[in-house]
């Protein structure tokens, strides 16, 4: 592919940093990438190995984004804009891309709308027409004027094929900052966070406070407060890094009388310094947040909020809500308040593993590959998975071929997903729900009633893709020694089994939102006494999910069989080739039988998460696959429970294509 990325950063260098990282990711995958930059050159952004076109640069004074300034510091005039537009269109014509990506526009950069629209409309007029994609960070700043938001949505609808969201909805979905309409929501493709930083293993012994204040003058207040704090408590071991956009005179004044090496310019080894620091103090821009997530460094965040900016504050609050940082509002920043926050965070427990997706560079490439391949396919051809995914798991070719074959026979392959053992909100559950929302795949979440914590109910209340089921009572093993584990096996009196099953449904109804819960029984360890199965309808259950078994009068039954965990061995990922060969064989012999994925989010490692993500990417995109909502799968249960019919947009059985 040939991919052209157009970006103009006006204040800090975060937009340019992310765009350059994406260009390098495309190049690393064997594609040609051209980066057209319309902001000031940024020394910390690596340009080596990239094809780069530099437009006459623009910047802004303070946060006045409506009045861009030219290279001479004066207001940008019509002649400058005409020169920039001509160079941008020349780059488009010379490069002849298969895909063009506009960074932030049409959700921002309204002052540059004429130049971006000229570029996009010229791309639309080319033959063959390239894909037109928008690229946005995890959080946007929405206008207070509804007409401007509606205008952005109209431009997405008329001119754009997809919107690449470089974030993880498990941390913050885009609609937390931007009011999406239905059309724009359907075009979102979450990529995960774009992390191009060098891997830095956290040191076993950390020391010192590392302060960083972005790339420009917007961090001057934080630099001044940190310098004064270093004078008051030098024993904490301060290292203060100032961006290259901070004027030299300001830097000299801030560092006056501080010990040597306390304050210096930003360094390319920042990630390594961060991994060895006891504490980070910083703003909360996109790349800074990724550095913190990658290095697992405790943090005090002072988000930039001047000019009504809300992006950094929202991101900082989301990180703090996950126990990954402490927030000090910019309006409350003084040397004394900073020292107080630093002391409190140094005494706090270290951040727990977060599970937030940092693989956004490679996944962006994979998404664009898929979109370009699909745009070139005749309408009757099935979607082909990206080369990136097939390189990761060649066995997925088996699945793709089986789905393609089903498509040629005009057969629909139904897919549904069940996850077991939920008790509370957690980073792992957020990651699970994030995957489901990113791929628009519904989940049946089997919750252990006796263990349900209030946080689970609160989390499910906002999870549009999740329905809950009753996972036994307490997940206790009552089998005699030497027999397979079971809570509801044939080892106990039927009355005891009935009482526990009834208690499970009652407790689940008390602790979970009614709109989320389906009266579906999921026996722990998938083992169930036949007598109890027959009694479930009399206890109020209308559905059963276990391992494949006979139909039960009065129950809608759907069983999950695709379990990727090697329970008897490594407890990591089973051999993908074996897993997918079995699925392919099942499709060949009985395409009417649904594919039922069974996962256990609380025990997944990276290999399992990666497999699930790749599997969903293929199944959710293939036109032969129907994604089945549990509310439809257990339709009798849904009607009986009175659950609200708030399924995924469009219908309760979501079809691809």
Image (cartoon, rainbow, N blue to C red):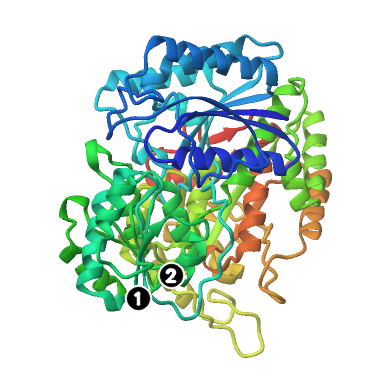
Quadrant showing the C terminus: top right
Tell me if residue 600 comes above or below residue 106 in the rendering. Answer: below
Front residue of this view, candidates 516 and 26: 26
Measured as percent of width and height from the top left, residue 347 is found at 29, 77
Tell me if residue 88 comes above or below residue 433 in the rendering. Answer: above
- Crowd class of label 1 (few under 14; some 14 to 19; many from 20; radius 10 Å): few
Marks 2 and 1 sit apart, C-alpha to C-alpha, by 8 Å
Indicate the quadrant where residue 485 lies: bottom right
Measured as percent of width and height from the top left, residue 633 is found at 56, 44
Measured as percent of width and height from the top left, residue 221 is found at 23, 51
Decide if residue 223 is on the left or right side of residue 620: left
Quadrant showing the N terminus: top right
Count of numbered circles in the view: 2
Decide if residue 253 is on the left or right side of residue 440: left
Front residue of this view, candidates 467 and 182: 182
Q: Secondary structure at mark 2?
A: loop
The image's mark for residue 642 is none
Which residue is labeled 1 in the image? Answer: 349
Decide if residue 192 is on the left or right side of residue 387: left
Indicate the quadrant where residue 468 lies: bottom left
Which residue is labeled 2 in the image? Answer: 352
């Amino acid at each position: 592919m040939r991919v052209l990325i157009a970006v103009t950063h006006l204040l800090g260098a975060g937009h340019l940093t992310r765009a350059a990282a994406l260009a390098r990711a495309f190049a690393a995958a064997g594609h040609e990438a051209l980066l057209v930059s319309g902001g000031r050159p940024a020394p910390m952004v690596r340009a080596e190995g990239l094809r780069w076109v530099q437009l006459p640069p623009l910047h802004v004074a303070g946060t006045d984004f409506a009045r861009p300034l030219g290279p001479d510091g004066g207001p940008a005039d019509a002649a400058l804009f005409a020169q920039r537009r001509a160079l941008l269109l020349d780059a488009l014509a010379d490069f002849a891309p298969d895909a063009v990506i506009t960074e932030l526009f049409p959700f921002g950069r309204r002052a540059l709308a004429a130049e971006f629209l000229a570029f996009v409309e010229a791309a639309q007029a080319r033959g063959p027409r390239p894909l037109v994609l928008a690229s946005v960070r995890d959080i946007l700043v929405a206008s207070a004027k509804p007409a401007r938001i509606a205008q952005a949505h109209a431009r997405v609808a008329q001119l754009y094929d997809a919107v690449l969201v470089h974030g993880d909805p498990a941390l913050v979905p885009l609609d937390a900052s931007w009011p999406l309409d239905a059309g724009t929501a359907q075009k979102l493709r979450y990529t995960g966070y774009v992390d191009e930083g060098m891997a830095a293993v956290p040191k076993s012994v950390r020391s010192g406070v590392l302060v960083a204040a972005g790339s420009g003058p917007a961090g001057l207040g934080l630099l001044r407060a940190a310098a004064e704090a270093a004078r008051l408590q030098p024993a904490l071991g301060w290292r203060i890094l100032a961006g290259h956009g901070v004027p030299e005179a300001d830097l000299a004044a801030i560092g006056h009388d501080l010990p040597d090496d306390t304050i210096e310019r930003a360094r390319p080894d920042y990630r390594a310094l961060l991994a060895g620091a006891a504490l980070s103090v910083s703003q909360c821009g996109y790349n800074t947040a990724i550095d913190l997530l990658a290095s697992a460094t405790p943090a005090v965040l002072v988000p930039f909020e001047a000019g009504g900016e809300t992006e950094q504050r929202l991101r900082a609050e989301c990180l703090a809500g996950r126990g990954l940082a402490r927030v000090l509002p910019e309006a409350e920043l003084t040397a004394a308040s900073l020292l107080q926050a630093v002391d409190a965070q140094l005494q706090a427990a270290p951040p727990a593993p977060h599970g937030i997706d940092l693989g956004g560079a490679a996944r962006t490439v994979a998404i664009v590959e898929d979109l370009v391949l699909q745009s070139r396919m005749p309408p009757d051809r099935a979607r082909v998975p990206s080369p990136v995914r097939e390189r990761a798991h060649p066995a997925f070719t088996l699945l793709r071929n089986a789905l393609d074959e089903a498509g040629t026979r005009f057969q629909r392959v139904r897919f549904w997903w069940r996850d077991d053992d939920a008790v509370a909100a957690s980073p792992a559950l957020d990651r699970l729900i994030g995957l489901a929302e990113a791929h628009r795949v519904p989940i049946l979440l089997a919750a252990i009633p006796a263990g349900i914590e209030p946080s689970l109910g609160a989390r499910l209340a906002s999870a549009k893709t999740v329905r809950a089921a009753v996972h036994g009572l307490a997940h206790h093993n009552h089998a005699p020694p030497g027999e397979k584990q079971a809570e509801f096996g044939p080892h106990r009196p039927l009355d005891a089994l009935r009482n526990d099953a009834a208690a499970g449904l009652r407790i689940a109804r008390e602790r979970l939102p009614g709109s989320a819960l389906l009266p579906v029984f999921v026996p722990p360890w998938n083992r169930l006494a036949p007598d109890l199965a027959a009694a479930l309808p009399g206890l109020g259950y209308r559905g059963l999910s276990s391992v494949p078994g006979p139909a039960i009068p009065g129950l809608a039954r759907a069983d999950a069989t695709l379990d990727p965990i090697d329970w008897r061995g490594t407890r990591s990922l089973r051999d993908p080739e074996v897993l997918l060969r079995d699925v392919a064989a099942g499709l060949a012999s009985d395409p009417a039988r649904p594919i039922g994925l069974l996962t256990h989010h609380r025990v997944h490692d990276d290999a399992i998460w990666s497999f699930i993500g790749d599997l969903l990417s293929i199944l959710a995109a293939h036109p032969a696959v129907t994604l089945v909502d549990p509310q439809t799968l257990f339709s009798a249960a849904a009607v009986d429970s009175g659950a609200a019919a708030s399924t995924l947009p469009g219908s309760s059985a979501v079809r691809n294509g």
